Image (cartoon, grey):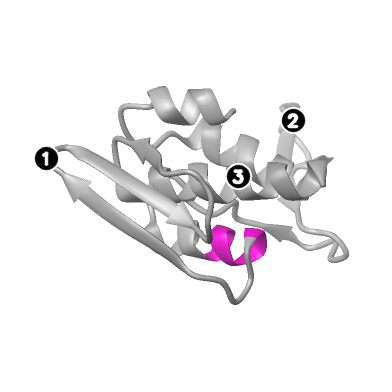
Amino acid sequence: MIESLRQAPGPDRKLDFAIATFVGFERRVAPQDDPTDTGVKIVYVRPPSEEPVKVPDFTRSIDAAYALAQVAAPRHVGAVTWEGAKFRAKLNDGEVCEAATPAIAVCIAALTELAKNQRA
């Protein structure tokens, strides 16, 4: 997923859903609102709640990316810089992560931190 984020030219909802699943959101099939509709309705929940939620726009919104970073490294420091059309983000003493947008760079830094913590 991190490599897909590095290659992303901009915000991508498929990547948002992948990030959500990685951080604990669950994908569920829910009953349709209209009983005559035979299609499948997919919702996401964030346990322990069973209420459907909107998956954040992690790759579009710097606020959503920041919230992800707070999950990865609560109460720690981070930074975003840019040069031309390339954006870089870093959490704590982690690696510098480069991407097409500031939000994606923060997502990469956060996921890198989460992966590092899972290996520890």
Outermost left residue: 84
Residue 35 pos. (x, y %): 78, 41
Front: mark 1 or 2? 1
First along the sequence among labels 1 and 2: 2
**Amino acid residing under circle 3:** Leu
Q: Which residue is mark 3?
A: 111
Q: Which residue is mark 2?
A: 40
Residue 86 drawn above or below residue 89: above
First along the sequence among labels 3 and 2: 2
**Amino acid residing under circle 1:** Gly
Q: Magenta: predominant secondary structure element? A: helix
First along the sequence among labels 3 and 1: 1
- Disc tally is 3
Local crowd size for mark 2, using a 10 Å CA cut-off: few (<14), some (14–19), many (≥20): few
Residue 63 pos. (x, y %): 42, 65
Q: Calculate the distance from the C-alpha at mark 1 to the C-alpha at mark 2.
A: 43 Å
Instruction: Report helix, strand or loop for mark 1.
Output: loop
Left or right of 7, for residue 30? right
Local crowd size for mark 3, using a 10 Å CA cut-off: few (<14), some (14–19), many (≥20): many
Label of residue 84 in the image = 1
**Amino acid residing under circle 2:** Val
| Magenta-drawn stretch contains 68 | yes
